[in-house]
Amino acid sequence: MRALRLGVTITCGRHHLPDGPRYVLHGLMACGTVTTGEHRVLGSDLVTDLMAQLEPHLHRQLSMNI
């Protein structure tokens, strides 16, 4: 994942709810943080959500590093 190569730290949160667990990913970078929506499964939909949240910030971070 390009975000990891650019120094983004990714953490996963698991929330225990009565109808089952929910997962949330947090991406921490130099210019701020992003958080995905809650997902029932720790899978590709969750990672795709994180990539969509990170993409605008990665362009900014690349511009700052050049």
Image (cartoon, rainbow, N blue to C red):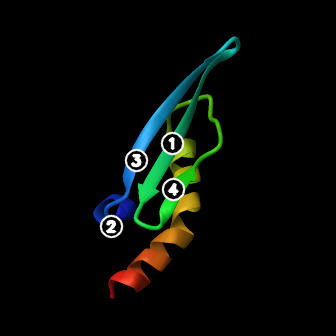
Q: Position of residue 10 (x, y in %)?
A: 40, 47
Query: Do the residues under discs 3 and 1 have CB atoms within 8 angstroms?
Result: yes
**Which amino acid does the dot numbered 3 rest on?**
Ile
**Marks 3 and 1, how far apart at CA:** 7 Å
The residue at which mark 1 appears reads as: 25
**Which amino acid does the dot numbered 1 rest on?**
Leu
Query: Is label 1 or label 4 in front?
Result: 4
Q: Earlier in the sequence, mark 2 or mark 4?
A: 2
Query: Do the residues under discs 1 and 4 have CB atoms within 8 angstroms?
Result: no
Single out the residue that lies furthest toward the right: 19
Crowding around mark 1 (Cα neighbors within 10 Å: few <14, some 14 to 19, many 20+) is many
The residue at which mark 4 appears reads as: 33
The residue at which mark 2 appears reads as: 6
Crowding around mark 4 (Cα neighbors within 10 Å: few <14, some 14 to 19, many 20+) is some
Query: Do the residues under discs 2 and 3 have CB atoms within 8 angstroms?
Result: no
Which of the image's four quarters has the C terminus? bottom left
